[in-house]
């Protein structure tokens, strides 16, 4: 059957080089997505952020985003576990 387009935009990642942060680049990218979503008549913009990335969480909260879902995960037995990357 035909795929149904969800009524929201989904941001997979916004990544700004550490040396270029705090210059408004991330905010400009986020505003561009939001503008596009409005033009497309979408109902919301959704994105994921790791809970341990407090800087990113604060960035999105300041931009008006709020948590609406909790993603839960259980490690597979025997799977090689990579430590999470930390953000400054």
Image (cartoon, helix red, strand yellow):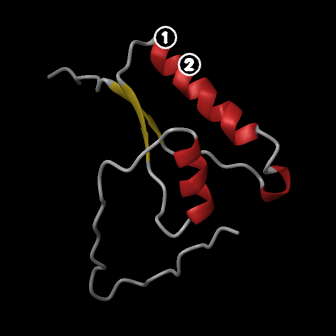
Q: Residues within 10 Å of mark 2 (few under 14, many from 20)?
A: few
Residue to which mark 2 is pinned:
35
Quadrant in which the C terminus appears: bottom right
64, 24: nearer the viewer:
64
Mark 2 vs 1: CB contact within 8 A: yes
- Residue 47 - label: none
Q: Is residue 78 left or right of residue 2?
A: right
Residue 8 horizontal/vertical position (percent): 36, 28
Residue 17 horizontal/vertical position (percent): 77, 53
Residue 5 horizontal/vertical position (percent): 29, 23
Quadrant in which the N terminus appears: top left
**Residue at point 30%, 60% (across, down):** 71
Considering every residue shown, the one lying at the far bottom of the view is 78
Answer with the quarter of the image where residue 33 lies: top right
**Residue at point 62%, 73% (across, down):** 86
Mark 1: secondary structure? helix
Residue 9 horizontal/vertical position (percent): 42, 29
Answer with the quarter of the image where residue 24 lies: top right
64, 78: nearer the viewer:
64
**Residue at point 62%, 25% (across, down):** 32
């Amino acid at each position: 059957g035909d795929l149904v387009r969800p009524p929201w935009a989904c941001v997979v990642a916004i990544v700004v080089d550490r040396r270029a942060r705090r210059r408004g680049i991330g905010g400009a990218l986020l505003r561009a997505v939001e503008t596009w979503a409005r033009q497309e008549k979408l109902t919301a913009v959704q994105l994921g952020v790791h809970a341990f990335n407090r800087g990113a969480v604060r960035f999105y909260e300041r931009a008006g985003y709020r948590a609406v879902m909790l993603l839960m995960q259980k490690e597979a037995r025997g799977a090689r576990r990579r430590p999470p990357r930390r953000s400054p």
